[in-house]
Amino acid sequence: MLIPPSVHDEIVVRGRGKPGAEEVEHAPWITVRRPVDRAQVAEIELRFDSGESEAIALALEIGALLLVDERIVIAEARRRGLEVTTTLLMLRQARKAGLIASVKQEIDDPIAAGFRVKPELVDTVLREVGQDRESEPRE
């Protein structure tokens, strides 16, 4: 998995102590890579922050699936021809593939730390994987 420097800084440096910061910092499968086309980054930064702009530019350069959660950024990425996934969709796939035991467990800490997601979307994904907000996974 590639992340641009601004995303790394947002998660690891400015996010120190928050859920996921230490995991991202030490994950051997995450590589920090700067987008080459700085002009494209600057153009995207007219509308979005540096992390979102670098992520879109990097995904365009390498033809990668983009992981992003904000609706307006999703719309921009799709407008530029990118394939997009979200945290909830990724967790749903991970649960279906048996990589995680509980979507609820994986999403509760980020929500508690300020990750914003519509409760209806969480409920929908939990139902799709046979869970609900009050219970642990059903097999």
Image: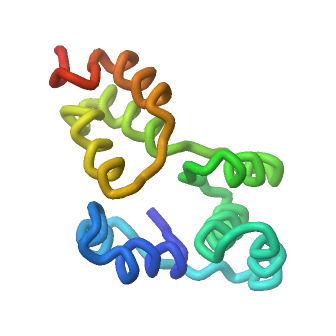
Residue 91, x across and y down, in percent: 37, 38
Q: Residue at x 79, y 49 (%)?
A: 81
Residue 64: x and y in percent read 61, 56
Residue 134 in the figure: left or right of residue 38? left
The quarter of the picture where the N terminus appears is bottom left
Residue 139 appears left or right of 59:
left
Q: Is residue 27 visible?
A: no
Left or right of 127 in this view: 132: left
**Which quadrant, please, contains the C terminus?**
top left
In the rendered view, tell whether residue 36 sits above or below residue 74.
Answer: below
Q: Is residue 12 above or below residue 63?
A: below
Q: Position of residue 131 (x, y in %)?
A: 27, 20
Residue at (40% x, 80% y) in the render: 14
Q: In terms of depth relative to the viewer, which is nearer, 116 or 70?
A: 116
Q: Is residue 37 above or below residue 113?
A: below
Task: Name above or below for residue 39 compared with residue 24.
Answer: below
Task: Residue 69: tell me if it is visible.
Answer: yes
Q: How many marks?
A: 0
Question: Who's the residue at 32% across and 42% down the image?
Answer: 107
Q: Nearer the viewer, residue 14 or 90?
A: 14
Residue 51 relative to residue 57: left or right: left
**Residue at 66% over, 72% down:** 49
